[in-house]
Image (spheres, rainbow, N blue to C red):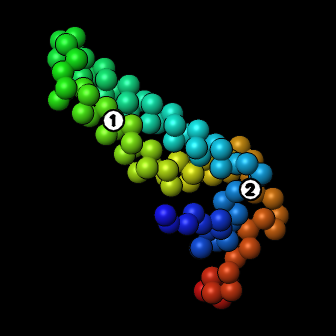
Amino acid sequence: MASVEQHCPRCGLDLERQVGSFIGGVGLNTIIAFVGLLAVLTIGFIATEGRASFWGILVPAPAVALLVPIGFYARSRLLWVALELRWWPLEPGEVNLPEATRSS
């Protein structure tokens, strides 16, 4: 499994500014996964006119329930960091620019 970055490689921002802030990203990921699953189930029932067919609902639903959380995890953490920055702006000294970026 790929490691999750703790700091932004470009600006040095700590991606977990508060203890346990990764929970927000996990929560966003869960919400997006449930919305996707609900959409597949709703569209599947409408498309099959209320008859739960194997190919119309029972194959796509588990695929969405497994693939969406895996594919969206990194983006959900990044989205959570963006929301945190909006709600709690950076304080002085919170971002430590790497040496290579400072000289540019």
Location of the C terminus (image quadrant): bottom right
Mark 1 or 2, closer to the camera: 1
The residue under the point 65% across, 44% down is: 23
Query: x%, y% of residue 76?
Result: 52, 48
Relative to residue 45, is residue 13 depicted above or below?
below
Label located before the other in sequence (1 or 2): 2
- Please name the residue shown 45% across and 31% down the image: 34
Residue at horizontal 58%, vertical 44%? Answer: 26
Q: Secondary structure at mark 2?
A: loop
Residue kind at label 1, given as amino acid type:
Pro
Q: Is residue 90 visible?
A: yes
Label 2: which residue?
17
Q: Residues within 10 Å of mark 1 (few under 14, many from 20)?
A: few
Residue 63 place in picture, x, y as percent: 31, 40
Q: Which mark is residue 62?
A: 1
- Residue drawn at the location 50% of the way across and 55% of the way down: 74
35 vs 84, nearest the viewer: 35
The answer to whether residue 80 is above or below residue 13 is: above
Graded by Cα atoms within 10 Å as few (under 14), some (14 to 19) or many (20 or more), the crowding at tag 2 reads some
- One can see residue 83 in this view: no
Q: Nearer the viewer, residue 25 or 54?
A: 54
Q: Which mark is residue 2?
A: none
What residue type is disc 2 on? Arg
Q: Secondary structure at mark 1?
A: helix
| 97 up-or-down from 55: above or below | below
* Left-right relation of 26 to 69: right
Q: Are marks 1 and 2 in contact (CB under 8 Å)?
A: no
How many numbered circles does the render carry?
2
Q: Position of residue 21 (x, y in %)?
A: 70, 48
Furthest-top residue in this view: 50
* Left or right, residue 26 beside residue 94: left
